[in-house]
Image: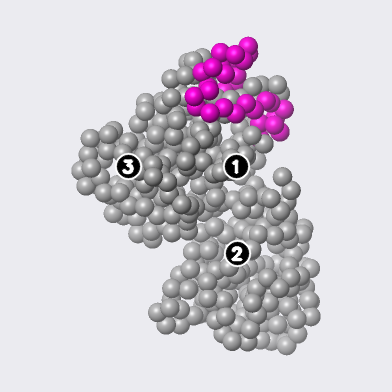
Amino acid sequence: MGMNDTPSSERVHIGIFGKRNAGKSSVINALTGQELAIVSDVKGTTTDPVSKAMELLPLGPVVMTDTPGIDDEGMLGSLRVKKSRQVLNKADMAVLVVDGTEGMASEDEALLEQIKKRGIPWIVVFNKSDLGGAALPEGRQYLSVSSVTGENIHELKERLASLMPEENGGRRVVADLLKPSDFVILVVPIDKAAPKGRLILPQQQTIRDILDAGAVAIAVKEDELKLTLGQLGKKPRMVITDSQVFERAAADTPEDIPLTSFSILFARYKGELAPFAEGVKALNHVQEGDRILIAEGCTHHRQCDDIGTVKLPRWIRQYTGTNPAFCFTSGTEFPEDLSSYRLIIHCGGCMLNAREMRYRIACAADAGVPITNYGMAIAYMKGILERSLDGIGWKA
């Protein structure tokens, strides 16, 4: 996989914030050497967050997001400001662009406090240094630049690289559980929900991690698993299944072969396993009419038997013997007020970066609402979660 093929969830997300006409778009263009953002003397030209995946040396693969001005006015303006603040949820680092001829305003100070509160690495860029202006505060996190002359743009890139967050704490999807020459069987259903002509991102990433470990990946459809196990001639190190066919995969996989799912592996990879394993127990306490939020991190065309909107609600009704009220969100949508929900069940979050998922888990914790993911909920309701966690050597 080349740098340009790096999935968005694995890139460093850089949010560019600031007041209208501070020069956010000009700074992005100067950083990238490309006309990626629209530049205008008219305040409020950027009306929605605009993201661009690219290479930014010496950082490498990044997603840069240009946001509306944090001082936008009126009802529409307040919605734009809200969208700007939502970008903070997934920002691995934040660049606050200030008009250097005016210095930091109250809106800048307030946003910087939000950035610090969330623990996001940051730098404040005083733009328009070619026009002179306000005195620069002390510290390496403040830098004077000119997007017109290019002054200190190279230094800005270097300082951004120094803020690089450690990638997933050195965790791996599955490679740390394998030895060279191990066999791993992947159960990949090919149905109406499967993308035409390709595998979904978690399956691709898992296969790559298996190969990086020097192990052997064998991908089969769910109706081929039993036959494949019988013909291998060697016991596989583990079976990894798509959550939708968890029950069948468990029935066809002998007890002495570790079994887990892509969903559980990725919860482990992103550091979400403990809260999700605890949160799933709330399924035992769901009562008639309780509100359950089912959240997906991406938007897609829903199939007739969609897992999030059809299968999960059906399985939950069967398991609990109740009829809860299901609510659904997708993409960047995530409710600000979670207090009315009895439980949140999130997708695997393969299209969201780790910071966005940590933010959503933290929001649930602050509201006192249990949260889990699709795969763990399915395994729990089918009575195979304990086996699936044992399969990766995880103990509560």
The image position of residue 115, as x and y in percent, is 54, 64
Q: Judge whether residue 234 is colored magenta.
A: yes
Q: CA distance from mark 3 to mark 2?
A: 33 Å
Q: Splitting the image into 4 quarters, where does residue 196 fall? A: top right
**Residue nearest the viewer, comparing 258 with 276:** 258
Stretch in magenta: 209-238
The image position of residue 269, as x and y in percent, is 57, 39
- In the image, what residue occupies the spot 57% across and 76% down? 46
Q: According to the image, label 3 marks what residue?
A: 313
Q: CA distance from mark 3 to mark 1?
A: 29 Å
Q: According to the image, label 1 marks what residue?
A: 197
Q: According to the image, label 2 marks what residue?
A: 51
For discs 1 and 2, the disc positioned in front in the rendered view:
1
Q: Judge whether residue 163 is colored magenta.
A: no
**Residue nearest the viewer, comparing 322 with 143:** 322
Instruction: Check disc 2 and give the amino acid type.
Output: Ser
Instruction: Check disc 1 and give the amino acid type.
Output: Gly
The image position of residue 331, as x and y in percent, is 47, 56
Q: Is residue 146 left or right of residue 276?
A: right
Q: Are marks 1 and 2 in contact (CB under 8 Å)?
A: no
